[in-house]
Amino acid sequence: MSEDTNRVLTLSASERENVKKTLWEAARQKALSCRQCPLSETRSKVVFGDGDPDSKLMFIGEGPGADEDAEGMPFVGRAGKLLTQILTAAGISRQDVYITNIVKCRPPENRVPSPQETVLCNKHLQTQIMLINPALIVLLGNTPTRWIMQTNEGITKLRGRWYDWRGIRVMPMFHPSYLLRNASSKEGSPKHLTWIDIQEVKRAWDEVRGK
Ligand code: URA
Ligand code: URA
């Protein structure tokens, strides 16, 4: 092992914290000025993410909608308010987790991001995951599930269980927009299943935090 590597490994906790802060701010600035894909031409604001970059629990959605594009914050529109409610009901407060999307700029008409846009935006997401180093990631809906897990299997089949992704436990869950379109909370409905899923997320999060 080189001396430089040894030196990195022996950085004190506060030195490491400072390095992370610097890298995080550089990543944020890079995303905020990104012009690498066509979405940058139509966006109002880049939506980098929200919450605690030191959290063990991360949520990944699809992409900003109109409200998110206007505010520069993820999940603040109707679906976002429902997500916040679901988290709160399970005892998870938004500021204690990190929330972001597969793409950081709004796809026009809220269409699904194209493969090209997703690939070009991926470095921002991967940098966030690397720096946050979460123990758990919740994938909201089909778009992040397909991209991260590299599968064509649908959310209905995959949701509610933990899968290993590069040593991180990932769980697909229904997207809150889907719950808005499926209002029933009868047993077995998407809302009911999501309530079960989020309680498992809370349980696992408590476990990794030693609570
Ligand atoms: N839907 C998403 O997938 N992400 C947001 O930030 C808002 C709505
Ligand atoms: N399609 C999605 O993208 N997400 C869901 O949760 C359900 C259907």
Image (spheres, grey):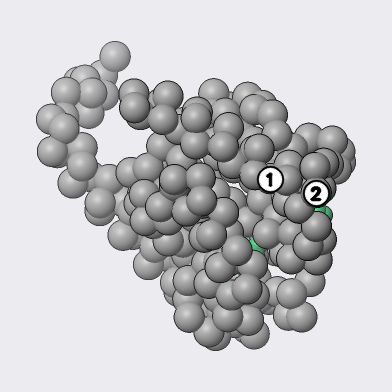
Q: Quadrant of residue 10?
A: top left
Which residue, given by chain and number where applicable, does mark 2 sit on? Answer: 186
Which type of secondary structure does the marked residue at label 1 adopt? helix
User: What quarter of the picture does the N terminus occupy?
Assistant: top left
Q: What is the x, y in percent for residue 40? A: 60, 77
Residue 164, disc: none
Q: Is residue 88 left or right of residue 145?
A: left
Residue at horizontal 48 percent and vertical 80 percent from the top: 71
Q: What is the x, y in percent for residue 153? A: 86, 38
The residue nearer to you, when weighing 208 against 23, is 208
Identify the residue at the far top of this view. Answer: 1
Q: Quadrant of residue 157?
A: top right
The residue nearer to you, when weighing 173 against 6, is 173
- Please tell me whether residue 70 is drawn above or below residue 85 in the rendered image: below
The residue nearer to you, when weighing 112 against 9, is 112
Residue at horizontal 76 percent and vertical 53 percent from the top: 185
Which residue, given by chain and number where applicable, does mark 1 sit on? Answer: 194
Q: Tell me, yes or no, if residue 150 can be seen here.
A: no
| Disc 2 packing (10 Å; few <14; some 14–19; many ≥20) | few
- Please tell me whether residue 155 is drawn above or below residue 48 in the rendered image: above
The three-letter code of the residue at mark 2 reads Lys
Q: Is residue 35 left or right of residue 134?
A: right
Mark 2 or mark 1, which has the lower sequence index?
2
Q: Is residue 26 left or right of residue 162?
A: left
Q: Quadrant of residue 17?
A: top left
Q: CA distance from mark 2 to mark 1?
A: 12 Å
Numbered label tally? 2
User: What quarter of the picture does the C terminus occupy?
Assistant: top left
Q: What is the x, y in percent for residue 176? A: 68, 59
Which type of secondary structure does the marked residue at label 2 adopt? loop
Residue at horizontal 42 percent and vertical 61 percent from the top: 50
